[in-house]
Amino acid sequence: MGFVKFERLFRAAGGVDVGRDDIKRYLDFVKDAVYDVLLIGQATAKANLRDVIEPWDLPITKGLQESIHNFERLEEDIEIEPILEQVAARPPLDAALTEATQARLPLIVGGISVALARTFKLINAEVKAVHTEEWERAFGLFRLLI
């Protein structure tokens, strides 16, 4: 993802400014979060005796679904391919993704991104620019929930 798109997404979604050095930590976080969602989806598929992951296997909470809808309304274009390539470089899943599941991944990345951007204002309503401390707190919250 280019910095301008990254910066624009976080301004539009969370009203915060991010720096060029933040893009790597953001991409690493999103990659990990998507992989975790897929792992749980795989477990659900296996529990239902399937070797394919359907969209309904993914643990999409009400809050994440709302963030996905908010992302769609933003009409921001994020480059999903580099993120998905990094996810694919992880240990392979034991279950395949259906086409419908693959088609949902960009929206899931967008929803996670919107939720992350909004989390900074929840952590500190006065924050204008995100720094290491806010990133670490936000990541800690997400690790508890995803």
Image: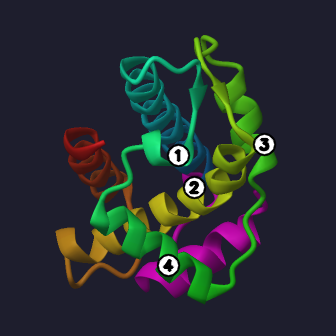
- Residue labelled with disc 3: 82
The image shows residue 93, relative to residue 52, as above or below, that is above
Rate crowding at label 4 as few (under 14), some (14 to 19) or many (20 or more) other CA atoms within 10 Å. some
- Residue labelled with disc 4: 69
Q: Amino acid at mark 4?
A: His
Nearest to N terminus: mark 4 or mark 3: 4
Q: Amino acid at mark 3?
A: Pro
Proximity of marks 1 and 2: CB atoms separated by less than 8 Å: yes
Nearest to N terminus: mark 1 or mark 2: 1
The image shows residue 129, relative to residue 138, as above or below, that is below
Rate crowding at label 1 as few (under 14), some (14 to 19) or many (20 or more) other CA atoms within 10 Å. many
Disc number for residue 100: none
Residue 5 inside the magenta-drawn segment: yes
Proximity of marks 1 and 4: CB atoms separated by less than 8 Å: no
Nearest to N terminus: mark 1 or mark 4: 1
Q: Which residue is rendered at x = 30% and y = 67% of the image? A: 63
Q: Secondary structure at mark 4?
A: helix
Q: Amino acid at mark 1?
A: Val
Residue 79 x %, y %? 78, 58
Question: Range of the magenta residues?
Answer: 1-22
- Residue labelled with disc 1: 30
